[in-house]
Image (cartoon, rainbow, N blue to C red):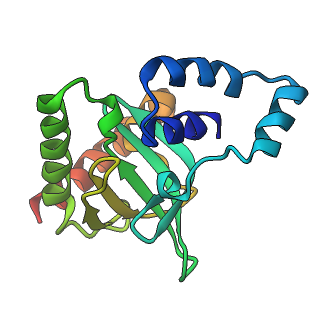
């Protein structure tokens, strides 16, 4: 929430120095400062918490140039995973274009893949915050790289081979 407040401040055109000063106040954990912020009505803008018709609830994961958010459709109450490529992580215009290309490539690669072991990509959105991909969401899902990192030593050769075959069959179709 604090990061969203600072982001909202940047969005209304305050210069960098003012935003830095205000971010120190917003990040102050003292009850007095929190109460003053609440009474002043400073809170994240709704625009900063939405991608299309989806309200962003919480960050599920993040990496270099992307963030995965839990999102909920504001009308239909459907949960989705929203992968945002935030422009705020880009240092210049070329980096912004690179984020856009990365998002488009990922969408084009995943669009036709339908496999029970993969979260299906549903949509691509260009937004003010950056390009975003909308995926099905299963809160029990675990990314394959994290599964392998955390549990590889528990997997026998047969299970490892089964996973490689499943990947090959999915990518071949």
Q: Position of residue 105 (x, y in %)?
A: 13, 50
Q: Position of residue 156 (x, y in %)?
A: 42, 36
Locate the N terminus by quadrant: top right
Left or right: where does residue 53 sit relative to residue 3?
left
Give the total number of marks visible in the rendering: 0
Name the residue: 15% across, 53% down: 104
Report the residue that reaches farthest toward the right.
Answer: 32
Name the residue: 46% across, 31% down: 14
Report the residue that reaches farthest toward the bottom.
Answer: 76
Q: Depth check: give the residue in front, 50 or 154.
A: 50
Q: Depth check: give the residue in front, 62 or 74.
A: 74
Name the residue: 55% across, 58% down: 46
Q: Position of residue 71 (x, y in %)?
A: 51, 61
Left or right: where does residue 32 sit relative to residue 79?
right
The picture quadrant where one finds residue 149 is top left
The picture quadrant where one finds residue 171 is bottom left
Q: Depth check: give the residue in front, 154 or 73.
A: 73
Name the residue: 43% across, 25% down: 15
Locate the C terminus by quadrant: bottom left
Left or right: where does residue 54 sit relative to residue 122?
right
Position of residue 62 relative to residue 51, above or below, is: above
Q: Position of residue 8 (x, y in %)?
A: 52, 42
Position of residue 51 relative to residue 94, above or below, is: below
Left or right: where does residue 122 sit relative to residue 72?
left
Q: Depth check: give the residue in front, 45 or 137.
A: 45
Position of residue 59 relative to residue 36, above or below, is: below
């Amino acid at each position: 929430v604090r990061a969203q407040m600072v982001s909202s401040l940047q969005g209304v055109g305050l210069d960098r120095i003012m935003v830095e000063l205000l971010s120190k106040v917003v990040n102050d954990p003292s009850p007095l400062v929190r109460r003053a912020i609440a009474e002043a009505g400073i809170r994240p803008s709704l625009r900063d918490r939405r991608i299309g018709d989806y309200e962003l609830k919480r960050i599920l994961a993040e990496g270099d140039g992307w963030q995965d958010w839990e999102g909920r459709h504001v009308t239909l109450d459907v949960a989705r995973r929203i992968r945002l490529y935030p422009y705020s992580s880009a240092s210049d215009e070329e980096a912004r274009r690179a984020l856009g290309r990365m998002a488009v490539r990922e969408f084009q690669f995943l669009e036709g893949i339908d496999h029970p072991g993969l979260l299906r990509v549903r949509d691509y959105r260009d937004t003010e915050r950056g390009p975003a991909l909308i995926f099905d969401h299963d809160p029990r899902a675990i990314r394959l790289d994290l599964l392998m990192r955390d549990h590889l030593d528990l997997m026998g050769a047969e299970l490892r081979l089964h996973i490689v075959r499943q990947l090959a069959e999915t990518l071949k179709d």
